[in-house]
Structures are given as C-alpha cells and as structure tokens.
Image (cartoon, rainbow, N blue to C red):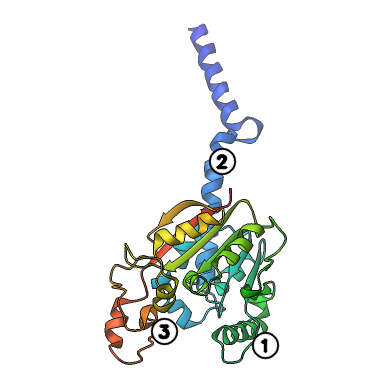
C-alpha cells in the first residue's frame, strides 16, 4: 500500500509539474490558444472598423456584395502588416484598411495624379481620395499616397522587399485593356517580401472566354485562368482560391458590360430593378504568394 501511494504521488506531482511548472502549460499547448485568441481579436477589430464612422452609408451598403471581412481574412491580413493597396480609387477599401493598420501596421495606396487631365476618371478619383484624407486625418492621417503613372514604367511602390501584402480590388481588367498589367505586377513583386501575399478580386468572365484585352476592357470581365496566368508569369505562385465573392445570378451578357450592374447602373433607370436583383458582379478572389 505504501509503494502504491508513492507511485500515485509521483504521478500527481508529474502532472502538476507539466501543467503548472515553469509558468503554466507547455508551449505546444499554448500556441493554438494564442493563435485563436489573436485571430478572434483581429476579427473583433475588423468588425468594429466596418461599423466605424469613417465609412459612408453607401459604402456599408456594398458589404453584402463585397464581403470585406471574409475577403481580408482569406488573404491573411494582420493588423501589424505593411500593406500596399493598388489603385485605391475613392477609397472604398482604404476606409477599412487605414484604421485597421493605423496602430501597428502601415498602409500605402496608389493613386493617379489629382492634377492630371480634369475629365479623366482617374483624376477625379484621385481628387476625391485626397479630399477624403484631408477631411478625416484621424482615420487617414497615417496613410501614404504613392502617385503613379503606370504608362511611364519603373514605378516604385516602396523599398524592395518591404511589404507584407499587396491588395487590389476590381482593377485587373483595366490594366489588361491598357497593356499595363506586366508593369503593375512587376512593381508589386519587387515591393513584396519573400512569402508576401498578393490578394485580388476581379470580375470573372464566363468559363471558356478567350482572353482578348479589348473584350476584357469593354465588358470588365476577365477569364479566371488568364488572371492566374498573368500573376504566375510575373513570378507569383497561386496559394488559394475562394468563392467568397461569387454571384451565380450574374449572366455577364449586359449592354454596358459589368457597369450595367450596381453600383454603376450605366443604363440609368432602364431595367434598374432587374439589375438590382442580380446585384454586383460575379468575382474571383485569388491569393498569390511571392516565393
């Protein structure tokens, strides 16, 4: 009986030492919990940012189509990353990324020259983005703006190997149509660290559609295999695909291409309810890695 008691006590002491010795559970038991806690904290922060006053009501109305929370989590965004957003336009995603990265991370966005041709859409977007930043320095004061002219080439998005992530949303068709995609991807590849992420969403063409730059430019829809091929040609490796932003209602056969659908409604009031019922476009969501 005495021997049995000693064995029992030894086992108890061993268990206590494993659970409480040297400050708690072994590292292997701590890491999963720490990872879950960090992910939950980031998700809570993202939910708060999405509801923040730096976003407009019309922007929040697009969340049901664009799924920003799920998209950024799919890309693997963390709030301590250095992120570059390509072609930020009027700042729909910038209004999410800026406050999320303000404390621990860094955000830079590319924009056209606000003093460019006054009738150009890119100039108008650049002006609106600059005005938005100026009106709300509390939300956007830490964002760096990189004015780019992709046609000139040799664009630098920052020091080589300095960014953790490059993201872009619904811009690929324009780069393809204007013969700029190779320059854009080369700049993105240079600025990313090894292991860095390129995340993009893009209007997705019907399966089997041929990759004609003119058709892509006229319709706004890019064939998914072609989108992958272009990124891989630039040196990226496809890591994962997601159907987060898929829309099976999108028939992709409209008079004014993707711009027939909301939020553009290029046909005005013609069949507006029909297109509203369809919603925004069917989109591919792709995550690439720089080896």
Do callouts 3 and 2 mark residues in contact (Cβ within 8 Å)?
no
Give 45 or 63, whichever is nearer the viewer: 63
The spot of residue 274 in percent (x, y) is: 27, 83
Q: Secondary structure at mark 2?
A: helix
The spot of residue 279 in percent (x, y) is: 34, 76
Residue that carries the numbered disc 3 in the rendered image: 264
Residue 40 in sight:
no
The answer to whether 247 is drawn above or below residue 9 in the figure is: below
Sequence-first tag of 3 and 1: 1
Q: Secondary structure at mark 3?
A: loop
Of the two numbered discs 3 and 1 in the rendering, the one whose residue sits closer to the viewer:
1
Of the two numbered discs 3 and 2 in the rendering, the one whose residue sits closer to the viewer:
3
The spot of residue 258 in percent (x, y) is: 38, 78
Q: Which mark is residue 115?
A: 1
Give 264 or 181, whichever is nearer the viewer: 181
Q: Which mark is residue 31?
A: 2
Q: Which mark is residue 251?
A: none
Question: Farthest right residue?
Answer: 159
Q: What's the distance in space between the residues labelled 2 and 1, CA to CA?
A: 51 Å
Of the two numbered discs 2 and 1 in the rendering, the one whose residue sits closer to the viewer:
1
Sequence-first tag of 2 and 1: 2
């Amino acid at each position: 009986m005495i021997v049995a008691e000693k064995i029992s006590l030894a086992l108890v002491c061993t268990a206590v030492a494993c659970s409480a010795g040297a400050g708690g559970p072994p590292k292997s038991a701590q890491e999963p919990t720490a990872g879950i806690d960090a992910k939950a904290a980031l998700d809570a922060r993202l939910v708060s940012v999405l509801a923040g006053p730096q976003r407009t009501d019309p922007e929040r109305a697009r969340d049901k189509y664009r799924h920003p929370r799920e998209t950024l989590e799919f890309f693997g965004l963390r709030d301590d990353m250095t992120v570059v957003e390509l072609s930020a336009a009027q700042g729909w995603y910038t209004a999410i990324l800026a406050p999320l990265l303000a404390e621990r991370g860094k955000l830079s966005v590319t924009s056209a020259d606000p003093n460019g041709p006054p009738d150009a859409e890119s100039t108008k977007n650049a002006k609106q983005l600059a005005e938005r930043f100026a009106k709300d320095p509390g939300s956007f004061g830490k964002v760096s703006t990189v004015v780019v002219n992709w046609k000139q080439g040799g664009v630098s998005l920052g020091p080589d190997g300095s960014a953790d992530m490059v993201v872009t949303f619904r811009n690929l068709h324009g780069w393809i149509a204007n013969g700029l995609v190779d320059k854009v991807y080369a700049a993105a590849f240079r600025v990313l660290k090894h292991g860095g992420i390129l995340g993009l969403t893009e209007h997705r063409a019907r399966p089997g559609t041929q990759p004609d730059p003119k058709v892509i430019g006229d319709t706004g829809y890019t064939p998914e295999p072609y989108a992958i091929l272009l990124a891989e040609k630039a040196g990226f490796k496809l890591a994962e695909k997601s159907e987060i932003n898929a829309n099976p209602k999108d028939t992709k056969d409209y008079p004014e291409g993707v711009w027939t659908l909301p939020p553009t409604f290029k046909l005005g009031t013609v069949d507006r309810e029909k297109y509203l019922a369809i919603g925004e476009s069917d989109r591919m969501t792709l995550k690439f890695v720089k080896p």
